[in-house]
Amino acid sequence: MTTPASPVLRHEDFQIPDRVDEKLITDYILRTILPTEANRIGYAVLPKIIYQTSVRFSDTAKSLVPPLLERLVIEGYIVQAPFPNCWRRAESGPAAKA
């Protein structure tokens, strides 16, 4: 009597969902990307934010980054400084309380 073989899972069997959670991306930008880049050079550049977000989540997250950054500016969490397309956490406002 033979026992049935356990199924072998292949990489192709796993699918990455097309939907990404904006809240997770926002949290990753605020708590990981911006502080890391601020420690290195004082600010994070847009291409680096987009790249790190796409590596962490997926390529579908790339298109969400610019609107999320705009929303974070409006909400007072980040500022675009010292150059265009360069971002850092706000020194006052909601980010200072986090």
Image: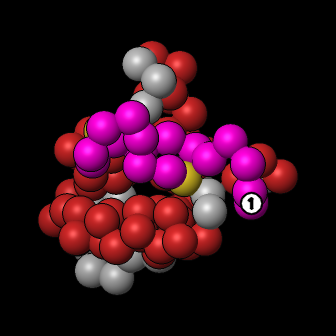
Helix, strand or loop at mark 1: helix
What residue is at 83 percent from the left and 52 percent from the top? 97
Where on the picture, by quarter, is residue 11?
A: bottom left
Residue segment shown in magenta: 79-94
Q: Position of residue 71 (x, y in %)?
A: 48, 73
Please say which color scheme the image uses: secondary structure
Residue that sits furthest to the top in the current view? 40
Q: Position of residue 96 (x, y in %)?
A: 77, 47
Q: Is residue 5 visible?
A: no
What residue is at 47 percent from the left and 24 percent from the top? 42
What residue is at 50 percent from the left and 51 percent from the top? 79
Q: Which residue is mark 1?
A: 94
Observer-nearest residue: 47 or 70? Answer: 70
Residue 36 vs 86, above or below: the answer is above
Report the number of numbered marks: 1
Residue 29 vs 75, above or below: the answer is above
Observer-nearest residue: 57 or 45? Answer: 45
